[in-house]
Amino acid sequence: MSNNEHDLKMPSFGSDMRKGTLVQWLVKEGDHIKRGDVVAVIETHKGAIDLDLFEDAVIISLLVKEGEQIAVGEPIARLSSVKDSENTAPPSTNVADIEPNPMSTKTAANISSSPAPTTSAAVINSSPAPTSAAVINSSPASTTSTAAINASPAPTSAAVINSSPAPTSAAAINASPASTTSAAVINSSPASTTGAAVINSSPASTTSAAAINASPASTTSAAVINSSPASTTSAAAINASPAPTTSAAAINPGSAPAEVEQDNSHFTTPEDFILATPAARFFAKQQQLTLNSLFPKPNNKIVTLTMVEQAILQKQLSQHSPATADKKETAKVSAAEKPKKGFDKEAMRQAISATVTRSKQQIPHYYLRQRLDITALKDYLLQVNASITIDQRMLLAAPLLCAIARTLMDSQQLNGEYTEDRFVASETVHLANAINLRGGGLVMPVIRAAQTLAPAQVMELLKQQVTRARNGSLVFSELSGGSFTVTSIGERGAEQMFAVIFPPQVAILALGSPHQEVMAVDSSIKIRSVIEASLAADHRVSDGRIGARFLYQLNQLLQNPQALWTV
Amino acid sequence: MNNNEIKTLILKELSNIAPEIEADDVPDDQDMREALELDSMDFLNLVIAVSKRSQVVIPEADYAKVLSLNAMISYIMKHA
C-alpha cells in the first residue's frame, strides 16, 4: 500500500498465457496516467487487447520497445503510483477497488473518495523516487486529512491537501538527502480547526515551501520548516483571512537565508525563481513550458497545479496552439492508429484447450446439482420490467448474478484463487461471466464487487460487456481477476451443464436453460419455472458440504426476489 | 408503415446487433434466436431497437409472439 514506485509487468490474460507482444505504447515517459487509462496494446493468442491501469500513476520509464515479445511477469515499464484520497470509513465500500489484481502487475490502490470519510490519508514512503506526490482532495466532512511523504533521496516531493470543510489537515514531508524541491500545501476553506504543514529536510534541500491557505476561521495554523545545512530557499506562508486564533510560521534554517512573514507574506526568492508545487512544475515541464513563461512576474504565491492548468488553458485560448494538446487528445490520435482489435478465433480455441486441459488434470473437481426455482424471480422481474422504460428492461441474468454474488459472500471457500499450493479467499466477489461469441469461443469479463450491486447496475455492466466482447474491445482489467465464474447455457440450450473450473479460481457455477417442470410443492403438484444449477468446485479447497450449502442458500434467496433489489 | 417497411426496419436492426448476419439468412417463420444464434441479450437489444423505431413497445410478456420475423412484423402491424 505504501511504496509508490514499482514495475508494470507483462500481464497474464489467462493461466495459459506465457508471453505477449507489446504492439504499441499509448503513453510516453513522464505521462500522468489515470486509473482506467489504456497504456499499451498487447498482442496475445487471444488477440490484441488494451492494457489499462488499475491506479493513478506516473510513467517513469518504458522498459521495452514496440514489437518486442515479453514473457508474462517480466517488467515492461516503471511506474510511480499517485496515491489519491483514501476512504477508510465504510470498510465494505470499494473493496473491489483496493483489491490489487492478482493476475495483473500489482498496483497500489486507488479509492475514490465517497461522501463523509472520517479519515483520509495518503502516505508515500519512497526511497530513491524522482517524484513523490500525495494529494488529497476531500470534500464534505473529512474530519482528518493527512498526507505524508517520507522520501529519501527524492528530488521532488509534494503533499497537497485540498479540503473543504475539514476540521483537521496535516501535510508532512520528511525528505533527507538532496530533495531539490519540497512543498506542503494545505488549502482548506471553511472552518479548518487545525492546519499544519511540516517539512523536515536535511542536507541540501534547495527549495522548501509550506503554505497554508485557510479562509474563514481557521483556529490553528502552523507551518514549520526544519531545514538543516544549506537550504537555499525556505518559505512558510500562512494566508489566513478572517481572524485565525493562532497562526505560526517557523523556519529553522541551518545556514539558509529565511524570512517569515505572516498574512500574505512576501518570500525572499531569487529574482526569477518561481515557487511552485512539484506537481505544477512537473505538469508545466510535461507541457514543455517553463513556469517563467506562464508566470513571468514572480509574486508571493506558490504556483499550484490548478494555476498552471488555468494558465495553460488561457494561453491555448489566446494562441490556439496545437503544440500543447493534452495527453487525452494524444491518446485519441494514437487510438485511431491502433492495430485492429478482436479475438483471434483459432488462437482462442488453443487457449481454451490449454486451460481446460490443465484444469482437468490438476484440479480435483467435485460436482453438485441443485434445481433453482425461479418462478418467484421471473414473476417479480416481469412486474419490474413492466414498470420501467424499455431500454432499462432487465434480463433474468441480472438479478441471478446479484443473488449468486451475495450468496458467495457466505461461501469463502468457493470464492478466491488457488496459487502456489495455497488457497487465498477473496474478500469481495469479482464475478466472471462467460459470454459466448458467435462463431465460437468464450470470453469472461469480470463484474467487480458484484455483491454490492443492484440488478439494474449489473444489467448495465452486462450490456456493456456483451457489446465489447462482441466487437473485441474488452480491456485487460475487465478480463482478469475474477474470483468465481458463472456460465449460462442460454435460453435455447441444454437443461443442465457441468463446467470446468477456470484456474486459478476454485469453483464455477453452470446454469442450464430456464424451463418449466412439474414439481411437488407443499404436497401438491405444480408447474414451476426452474434452472438446473450445477456447481463444480475444487476438492482441495472445499468439501461437498460447502458447495451444497451455497446452492441451498442461493435457492432460498431466489424465493425472496424483492430482497435482490435492495442493496 | 407497411409490411415491407417493417421488414426492412427489423432486418436493419438485426444487422446492427449481429453484423455477420445477411438479410437473406433470416428465415421468415423460424425462431430467430435459434436460427441466428441470438442470445437473450441480442434479442432484448432487437426488441428495444424495433420498439423505438416503430413506436410499438413490445412488452416482455409478448416476447413469445415476436419470435420469428413474420410474427414480429404482424405484431407491429397489429399494434401500430
Image: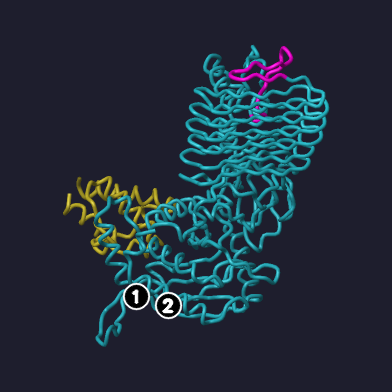
Chain colours: A cyan, B yellow
Horizontal placement of A176 versus A337: left or right? Answer: right
Mark carried by residue A552 = 2
Q: Position of residue B42 (x, y in %)?
A: 38, 56
> In the depicted view, which residue is nearer to us: A369 or A259?
A259
Q: Which mark is residue A280?
A: none
- Amino acid at dot 2: Tyr
Q: In the figure, A228 relative to A3: above or below?
A: above
Q: Amino acid at mark 1?
A: Asp
Alpha carbon distance from label 1 to label 2: 11 Å
In this image, A245 relative to A66: left or right? left
The answer for which chain carries disc 1 is: A
Residue bounds of the magenta highlight: A259-279
Q: Of residues A490 and A374, which is closer to you in this image?
A: A374
Coordinates of residue B6 in the picture (x, y in percent):
25, 49
Q: Nearer the viewer, residue B35 or A548?
A: A548
Residue at image position (64%, 35%) is A159
The chain holding disc 2 is A
Task: Please name the residue that numbered disc 1 is placed on.
Answer: A373
Q: Tell me where residue A552 sits by quadrant.
A: bottom left
| Residue ID at (50%, 63%) | A434
Q: Count neighbours of disc 2 (C-alpha within 10 A) and say few if under 14, some if 14 to 19, many if 20 or more.
A: some
Left-right relation of A134 to A519:
right
Q: Position of residue A563 (x, y in %)?
A: 34, 64
Q: Report the quarter where the C terminus of chain A lies.
A: bottom left
Which secondary structure lies at badge 2?
helix
Q: Residue at x 72, y 41 (%)?
A: A150
Most common SS among magenta residues: loop
Figure quadrant of residue A512: bottom left
